[in-house]
Image (cartoon, helix red, strand yellow):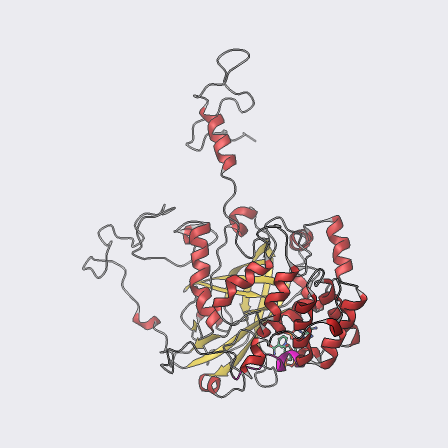
Amino acid sequence: MCAKKLTTTAGSPVPDNQNSMTAGARGPLLMQDYQLLEKLAHQNRERIPERTVHAKGWGAHGTLRITGDISKYTCAKVLQPGSETAMLARFSTVAGEAGAADHERDVRGFALKFYTEEGNWDLVGNNTPVFFVRDPYKFADFIHTQKRHPRTNLRSPTAMWDFWSLSPESLHQVTILMSDRGLPVTPMHMNGYGSHTYSLWNAEGERFWVKFHFKTEKGHEHYTNAEAEDVVGKTREGYQEALYNTIEGGDYPRWKVQVQIMPEAEAEVTSYNPFDLTKVWPHDEYPCIDIGVMELNRNPDNYFAEIENAAFSPSNIVPGISFSPDKMLQARIFSYADAHRYRLGTHYEQLPVNRPVCPVHHYHKDGTMNYEGQQTGVTDAYYEPNSVDGAPEEVPAAMEPALKIDGNADRYNHREGNDDFGQVTALFELFDDGQRKRLFGNIAAAMGGVPAEIIERQCRLFDQVHADYGKGVRDAVKSANLGKYDPNAVPVTEATPQDAAE
Ligand code: NDP
């Protein structure tokens, strides 16, 4: 086969890719050796800013097939029975940097992009149905506790437990993180959850609240801390290897796709706030309805172009699917798209992996990476409204039903009337003795070096979930001989925010 010509980025043939151009037999180099300059300059620019959170990721392409019929709830074409949509998944850890080991105890990101004929629909969830905080004011602070201490440049268990012990709403997610599900064997052995409450709307303009669930068909499998340490001692890339090799071998991983549906008015009467990201909707009240299957069946040809450059944002919805009053969702609608404008450039949606399969027409102009020029498709149409023939016009038919709000522009206190403990108790009661023992041990192991007062403040929150929870953690901390922890010697701590609200 005839080899391709090696060229500069401008297409000029490169005559020699082994020897730099010199003035004499022993140098020095010449400025005019542009091929060399270009090569050095490109190497300097191979990295883009890594994501502040979810930096380490693994992903693949696949298909969403809808088999169930929820057409009475939504007019979204992607969710109609029989529809088949190409999609992309990116899994990730939250706290570690791009080079972090895969098998660390952490929440896993579960980000999905569906290339629908009505635009890209992104569902940017996690492998857990809840999150640590319910208010975006706390998000940046929370993430700071998961990252490195400014002076030591080390992760700080003290910061983590200080924050958690002062934020009782984190108990639900902390309990899942420290339970068996906090360390899945591979991305294929865990569930995904849209986590937030979203909404669906139908052709009659009725809105329904919805939770999305993706249930692993390979089953849940987890490592203990000790098993994971053993794996990380051998490979830091265990997820990448497992996902890539499984798909390459034709054993395509699948997830059962389910929704929970809540009629719009019921959100006002549930005992819990259904838009609170620290809560689930109990299955017996809102059963999971099977609607289809998601399958991953194609590895990316180029990891950087198709996974690192992939830009998922909850702001990407399509007609028939919309948002909810969830404060964390509302904040992410801004912050995820903004992260990609910073990380990839203003026109990141023009990158092949992010580009919708339907025509795109808008009046945004110029800016970094706008290599497609005028996105209206008509040269003279570069403002709106205009009277230019063939110019893009708004689509009133895509208008979603009005969101019902109470008109109270208050900084309403989510702690009032909010039970941060009941659902955690329900979870704790699902755990058998072995699961509880591992939960206590994992928490104790994560508390190394944490001051006794913070440990005790956290244990008092565990007490409020279940007496066995607080006791179990205290015993595990003592037997792990962590620091000088002795509950009897700990001074009475200040009231937690939960105590203050009661
Ligand atoms: P159910 O008994 O109907 O549901 C319990 C659910 O908990 C299971 O369906 C499973 O969810 C999940 N689960 C089971 N074992 C574990 C585990 N070791 N770690 C984490 N999750 C586990 O009761 P409820 O719906 O009333 O929920 C009770 C508690 O279960 C909740 O407070 C919440 O902590 C947890 N949970 C609930 C979910 C929900 O959407 N209702 C989802 C996940 C957890 P799955 O089928 O998703 O694997």
Q: Going 61% across and 61% down the picture, which residue do you hit?
A: 159
Residue 236 vs residue 45: left or right? right
- Is the C terminus in the top left, top right, bottom left or bottom right quadrant? bottom right
Q: Which of 323 and 13 is in front in this view?
A: 323
Residue 72: x percent and y percent?
46, 81
Q: In this view, does 31 lie to the left or right of 388?
A: right
Q: Can residue 80 be seen in this view?
A: yes
Residue found at x 48% / y 55%: 311
Q: Nearer the viewer, residue 258 or 22?
A: 22
Ligand number 1: quarter of image: bottom right
Residue at image coords 33%, 57%: 361
In the rendered image, residue 291, in percent from the top left (x then y), is placed at 55, 74
Is any atom of residue 129 visible in this view? no
Q: Residue furthest left?
A: 387
Q: Answer with the quarter of the image where residue 125 lies.
A: bottom right
The quadrant of the image that shows the N terminus is top right
Residue at the spot x=57%, y=52% of the render? 150
Total count of labels: 0
Q: Position of residue 393 (x, y in %)?
A: 27, 63
Measured from the top left, where is residue 206 in percent x and y?
Answer: 40, 82
Farthest residue to the top: give it.
24
Residue 422 inside the magenta-drawn segment: yes
Of 94 and 194, which appears nearest the observer? 94
What is the residue that sits farthest to the bottom in this orientation? 269
> Is residue 437 toward the left or the right of residue 87 in the image?
right
Magenta highlight range: 417-425
Does 128 appear in magenta? no
Q: In this view, does 339 lie above or below 43?
A: below
Quick check: 165 above or below 45?
Answer: below
Quick one: which residue is furthest to the right in this view?
A: 479
